[in-house]
Amino acid sequence: MNFEDKVIITVISGIVLAVFLDLQAKKQYHHVKNNIKKVSIEELLEDKKIHKAKEQIEEVYEENKEKVIESAKKIPQKIENSYLKNLESLTLPYNDAEITEINLYFPRFLKNKKTEMYQVSRKIKGKVNPIIALNILQKGPLEKEAGLVNAYYEGVSFYKISYDEEKQILHLFFDQSFYSHNDVIMKDRIDQICLTLKQFPEIKSIYYWIENQLYLKQEKCERKVIKYKEETKIKEN
C-alpha cells in the first residue's frame, strides 16, 4: 500500500470516527435532556400534591378546630379520672358521717438552721385517697398551727400518680420544681410526703420521679415526729 492510499484510509477513518462520536454525543444529549424534563415534571407534580394535601389538612383542621379544642380541654379531666380510678381501693378509714381523720406533717425551723417534724391532725369531710391527702398537705399549716412551715408548698408541681397494686408501690411524678438544692428543704419535703402517705396500709413503697427520671425509692420514713397539740375544726374537702 502506497502513501496516498494510507492517507485516504486515515482521513476516511477520521471522518467515520467523528460522525460516530457526534451521533453518540447527540444521543447522550437527548437522553440527558429527556431525563431532566422528566424529573422536573415529576418534582412539579409532587410539589402540587404536597400543596394540595396541605390545603386539605388545613380545611379539615378549620372544620374540626372547635371539636379538637373541646376534646383537648377534656383530656386533663380524663387523665385525672383514670388516676383516681386506679386509687379507688386506697382510702383512709372514715366514720358513718364520712368524716376522715388524717395526720399531716410539717417542719419547724430551729435556731441552728435544722428542722424538726410535727404531726397535726385534721378532720376532713369525705373520703381521702392519696391525691386528696397530697392536696391537703400542699396547702400547708393552718393559722392556728403557729411556727410550722411547709417544704411541700403549692409551687411544687405534681402532675401524675400511679399505684402498682401487686407490688404495693405508689409512683409520684413531679416536674423539675420538686427538686431543691437546699438539703434541709429537700429532706423535709420527702419526709412530709412519706409520713402522710404511709398512713395508707396498702402503700409499702413510694417511688419519686422527676421529669420521668427515678429520683428516689422510699420504703420507710425514718424521721422523728413530734405531735402538735393544737386541735383543728372539721374542714370541707
Image: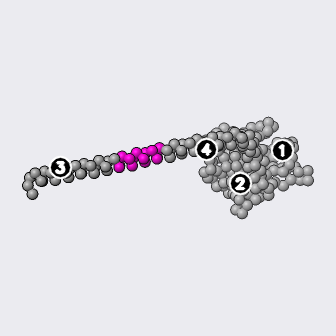
Q: Name the residue type under label 2.
A: Ser
Q: Are the residues flagged by discs 4 and 3 in contact, CB closer than 8 Å? A: no
- Earlier sequence position, callout 3 versus callout 1: 3
The residue at the point 79 percent across, 36 percent down is 143
Instruction: Give the image location of residue 49, x and y in percent.
Output: 57, 45
Q: Which residue is mark 2?
A: 162
Kindly identify the residue that appears in the image at 53 percent across and 44 percent down: 45
Q: Are marks 2 and 1 in contact (CB under 8 Å)?
A: no
Q: How many marks?
A: 4
Of 125 and 229, the residue lying toward us: 125
Q: Are marks 4 and 1 in contact (CB under 8 Å)?
A: no
Residue 11's disc is 3
Q: Distance of mark 2 from mark 3, alpha carbons? A: 93 Å
Q: Which mark is residue 53?
A: 4
Q: Earlier in the sequence, mark 2 or mark 3?
A: 3
Question: Which image quarter is the N terminus in?
Answer: bottom left
Residue of label 1: 237
Q: Amino acid at mark 1?
A: Asn
Q: Residues within 10 Å of mark 1 (few under 14, many from 20)?
A: some
Q: Secondary structure at mark 2?
A: strand
